[in-house]
Each structure stands twice: as structure tokens, then as C-alpha cells.
């Protein structure tokens, strides 16, 4: 039987990884992708410990980095941006912070997934469905008024 890892340990390890990757990114921009991924994982760990403000700030930074990466190489980084936006919107929803910002992120994620779905139906069908469900849930909870 496997124990569930303590999210506080994940926060500690994630914080150290982000710190190290920030330092590496300052000298070698090739590490920006790794930093964005580490920030994303850290935001999930922070949310698991109910540190919502820190989780949202960290997720926002990860999205910002992903947006920068997409401008340089959309084909490689758009799927990651869509996942990050979906994750951020879901985090807001789970945290009971269903806002217009979450709905906008879910909409953007869905728009990206729809583009990706046109190019690779099998590769992005599930993600597109999940983003659609997240947006529907946000609309139901008042995250966005029509």
C-alpha cells in the first residue's frame, strides 16, 4: 500500500526547484520551459495545502511564462499554455473563487484546444472536452455573466 505524499513536502521541494531554476534561467533562457513547469507543479502543491493566494500567484507566473514561450514557438508551447490555463481556471473553481478571470482563462484554453483539435483530433479530444466542462461549470457558478 502506497502512502499519499504530504503536500507540504511537495511545496518545500517545489519551492527549492523554482529557486534553482530561476537562478539557471538568469544565465540560460533554455530553462524557462522548466521553470514554467516547476511553477505549475508548485501551484498545485500550494493549492493542496489550501494556500490559495500563493497558489494563484504562482499559477499566474507560470501562465505568463507560457505565453512568452508561445510567442517564440506556438507549435511546441500552445498545448502547454492551454493546459496551464485550464489548470488555473480549475484551481480558481476548486478554491471557490469562480471569477470572470477564471472564465476568461477557461475560454482561452478552450479556444486553443479547438485549434489544436483541428490539427490533431485524437491528441486533444479529451483535453478539449475537459476545458468545455470547466467553462460550463464556471458559467453555472456565476464565473461569467452573459
Image: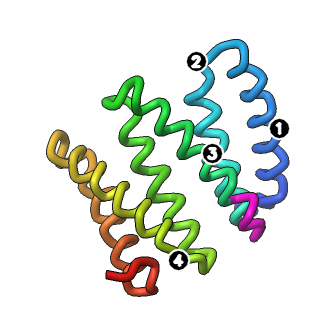
Viewer-nearest residue: 86 or 145: 145
Element marked by disc 2: helix
In the drawing, does residue 86 fall left or right of residue 132?
right
- Residue 85 circle label: none
User: Which comes sooner in the sequence, label 2 or label 1?
Assistant: 1
Element marked by disc 4: loop
Kindly indicate whether the residue at mark 3 contacts the one at mark 2 (C-beta within 8 angstroms).
no
Please give the residue where the numbered disc 3 appears in the rendered image: 61
Question: Is the residue marked by circle 1 packed among few (<14), some (14-19), or many (20+) residues within 10 Å?
Answer: some
Kindly indicate whether the residue at mark 1 contacts the one at mark 2 (C-beta within 8 angstroms).
no
Viewer-nearest residue: 119 or 126: 119
Question: Is the residue marked by circle 4 packed among few (<14), some (14-19), or many (20+) residues within 10 Å?
Answer: many
Q: How is the protein colored in the picture? A: rainbow
- The mark lying in front, picked from 4 and 1, is 4
User: Which comes sooner in the sequence, label 4 or label 3?
Assistant: 3
- Residue 98 circle label: 4
Element marked by disc 3: helix
Q: CA distance from mark 1 to mark 3?
A: 16 Å
Q: Farthest top residue?
A: 27
Q: Which residues are magenta?
A: 50-55
Please tell me which residue is depicted at 49% across the width and 66% down the height of the picture: 101
Amino acid at each position: 500500500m502506497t502512502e499519499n505524499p504530504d503536500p507540504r513536502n511537495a511545496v518545500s521541494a517545489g519551492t527549492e526547484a523554482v529557486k534553482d531554476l530561476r537562478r539557471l534561467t538568469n544565465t540560460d533562457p533554455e530553462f524557462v520551459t522548466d521553470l514554467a513547469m516547476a511553477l505549475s507543479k508548485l501551484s498545485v502543491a500550494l493549492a493542496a495545502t489550501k494556500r490559495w493566494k500563493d497558489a494563484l500567484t504562482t499559477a499566474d507566473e507560470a501562465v505568463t511564462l507560457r505565453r512568452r514561450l508561445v510567442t517564440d514557438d506556438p507549435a511546441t508551447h500552445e498545448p502547454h499554455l492551454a493546459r496551464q490555463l485550464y489548470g488555473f481556471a480549475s484551481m480558481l473553481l476548486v478554491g471557490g473563487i469562480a471569477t470572470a478571470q477564471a472564465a476568461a482563462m477557461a475560454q482561452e484554453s478552450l479556444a486553443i484546444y479547438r485549434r489544436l483539435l483541428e490539427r490533431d483530433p485524437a491528441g486533444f479530444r479529451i483535453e478539449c472536452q475537459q476545458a468545455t466542462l470547466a467553462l460550463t461549470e464556471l458559467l453555472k457558478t456565476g464565473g461569467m455573466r452573459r
